[in-house]
């Protein structure tokens, strides 16, 4: 189904604990992230994103330095998540020019393929929903 969300778990390794903290702080308000946590230089995150954006999270695993500034990343797409029936993205009241992580979708090389960040003006589905 087109509107289904995919849950992806990220286990990443940053260069240092400080770098892991910087990454977690930068991405903590990403609409697709439910939580981020660190342990020493490891970074853990749970993403809920539209199925058609699965390529993006898989790209993070292929290019961890270019995307999240991680040394290594392992992504696991889970089969089922036991949680409330409805998950809701944390979105601003008005779309932003720059995403909560500080990225400008309009200048991103992947934007042609990507839907853009749902928190921004660049999101290609103005309804601001998860589908």
Image (cartoon, rainbow, N blue to C red):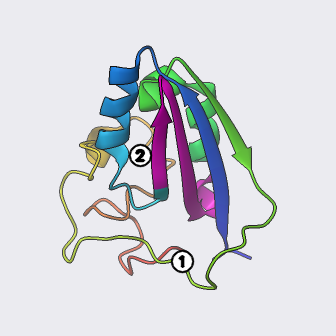
Total of numbered circles in the picture?
A: 2
Tell me the tag on residue 101: none
Q: Residue furthest right?
A: 79
Q: Residues within 10 Å of mark 2 (few under 14, many from 20)?
A: some
Which residue was labeled with disc 1? 87
- Range shown magenta: 35-54
Quadrant placement of the N terminus: bottom right
Q: Along the polypeptide, which appears first: circle 2 or circle 1? A: 1
Give the Cα separation between the discs numbered 2 and 1: 25 Å
Left or right relative to 83: residue 125: left
> Tag 1, which secondary structure?
loop
- The x and y percentages for residue 103 are 28, 42
- The x and y percentages for residue 3 are 63, 77
Q: Nearer the viewer, residue 1 or 43?
A: 43
Which residue was labeled with disc 2? 111
Residue ID at (21%, 51%): 98
């Amino acid at each position: 189904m087109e509107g289904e969300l995919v849950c992806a778990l990220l286990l990443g390794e940053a260069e240092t604990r400080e770098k892991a903290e910087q990454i977690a702080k930068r991405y903590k308000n990403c609409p697709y992230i439910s939580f981020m946590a660190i342990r020493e230089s490891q970074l853990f995150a749970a993403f809920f994103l539209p199925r058609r954006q699965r390529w993006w999270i898989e790209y993070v695993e292929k290019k961890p330095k270019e995307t999240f500034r991680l040394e290594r990343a392992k992504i696991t797409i889970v089969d089922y998540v036991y949680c409330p029936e409805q998950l809701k993205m944390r979105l601003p009241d008005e779309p932003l020019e720059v995403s909560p992580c500080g990225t400008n979708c309009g200048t991103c090389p992947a934007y042609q393929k990507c839907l853009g960040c749902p928190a921004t003006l660049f999101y290609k589905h103005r309804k601001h929903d998860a589908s």
